[in-house]
């Protein structure tokens, strides 16, 4: 083995210079990239004490939990905090919190559990109202709001005023997949959310059920009286795909439609209609089918007061690719 050879003055100078450069680089990096301040934890937000005896139970502050329930701004942040509180503290739908350190905790309803219960109740009401399964989870945020769908979305923000005034809406388009049915279902969902009753009917299918009741007398199908009650009772009636029925049930459709619309007009109950047909011919002398031609002006006059929106944005939403496909 050879003994360690002392560094020469030149080598030592190089080492010292390299060490100085390294320290300077570290100082520059620290100045240019300061460490971020620590992010407050959920426990901090909820007012937990930073230091408590290890044997003492930890409870969030009651004032903070109640403030979370009243919070309306920053919905994404509120939802994250509420979910964290639910995951850590919820016991059977209740959050136990203390007014002050050492006091006995009191129970406060968990906002996450309340939201889950409301959504489950809404889904049950939508199913009972006749909303098709494909629309149960639909929201306006999932629909491209091309004109005039954007107008419908804006009006639905105050759906109660529309229902109270008894004004009706016809969404028609000669193209399928235009979003008119989805918009109608979302309007129905908005009505249910404010506590109103809704019924969704396909008149052609309803008339067929009535006819089968007459033919079979099984008692399982729908009677004409029951069908009429289904159309007159709710606060909002949605008639989907009007005018798509077959000739063999035309008389039943016309009678049900007239009686239902006549009742609803007299009682100022709102109706939303979707159809692939316009209300009247698009131009004089046209032989193309229209709702007034199929059901008669006497029937369609019962839709007044009526707003007609032609959904003609030119996009077929059914052709759009989904996240999962073959």
Image (cartoon, rainbow, N blue to C red):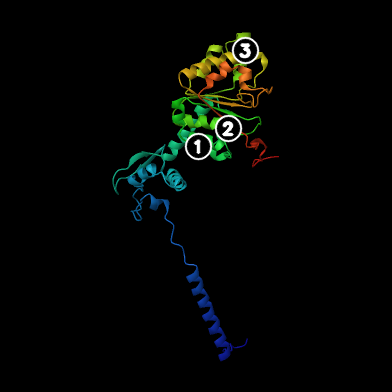
Q: Nearer the viewer, mark 2 or mark 1?
A: 1
Q: Secondary structure at mark 2?
A: helix
Q: Is residue 6 left or right of residue 93?
A: right
Q: Which residue is mark 2?
A: 182
Q: Earlier in the sequence, mark 2 or mark 1?
A: 1
Mark 3 against mark 2, which lies toward the viewer? Answer: 3
Q: CA distance from mark 3 to mark 2?
A: 28 Å
Which of the image's four quarters has the N terminus? Answer: bottom right
Q: Position of residue 13 (x, y in %)?
A: 55, 87
Q: Nearer the viewer, residue 67 or 192?
A: 192
**Mark 3 packing: few (<14 Cα in 10 Å), some, or many (20+)?**
few
Residue sitting at the far bottom: 9
| Residue position marked by numbered label 3 in the rendering | 251
Q: Earlier in the sequence, mark 3 or mark 1?
A: 1
SS of the residue at dot 1?
A: helix
Tell me what residue is drawn at x 53 percent, y 36 percent: 151
In the rendered image, which quarter is residue 322 located in? top right
Q: Is residue 90 above or below residue 310?
A: below
The residue that label 1 is drawn on is: 154
């Amino acid at each position: 083995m050879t003994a360690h050879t002392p560094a020469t003055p030149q080598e030592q100078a190089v080492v010292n210079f390299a060490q100085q450069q390294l320290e300077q680089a570290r100082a520059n990096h620290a100045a240019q990239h300061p460490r971020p301040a620590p992010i407050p934890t959920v426990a901090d937000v909820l007012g937990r004490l930073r230091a408590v005896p290890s044997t003492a139970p930890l409870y969030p502050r009651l004032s903070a939990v109640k403030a979370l329930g009243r919070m309306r701004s920053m919905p994404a942040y509120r939802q994250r905090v509420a979910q964290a509180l639910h995951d850590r503290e919820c016991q059977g739908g209740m959050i136990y919190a203390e007014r002050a350190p050492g006091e006995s905790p009191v129970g406060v309803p968990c906002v996450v559990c309340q939201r889950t219960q409301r959504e489950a109740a809404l889904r049950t009401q939508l199913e009972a109202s006749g909303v098709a399964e494909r629309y149960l989870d639909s929201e306006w945020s999932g629909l491209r709001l091309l004109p005039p769908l954007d107008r419908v979305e804006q009006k639905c923000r105050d759906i109660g005023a529309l229902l109270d005034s008894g004004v009706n809406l016809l969404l028609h388009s000669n193209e399928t997949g235009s979003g008119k049915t989805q918009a109608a279902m979302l309007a129905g969902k908005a009505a249910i959310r404010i506590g109103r009753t809704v019924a969704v009917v396909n008149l052609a299918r309803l008339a067929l059920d009535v006819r089968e009741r007459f033919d079979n007398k099984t008692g399982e199908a729908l009677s004409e009286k029951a069908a009429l009650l289904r159309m007159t009772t709710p606060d909002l009636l949605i008639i989907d795909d009007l005018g798509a029925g077959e000739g063999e049930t035309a008389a039943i459709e016309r009678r049900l439609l007239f009686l239902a619309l006549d009742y609803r007009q007299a009682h100022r109950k709102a109706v939303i209609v979707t159809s692939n047909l316009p209300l009247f011919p698009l131009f004089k002398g046209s032989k193309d089918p229209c709702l007034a031609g199929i059901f008669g002006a006497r029937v369609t006059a019962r839709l007044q007061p009526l707003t007609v929106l032609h959904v003609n944005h030119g996009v077929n939403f059914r052709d759009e690719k989904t996240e999962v496909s073959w």
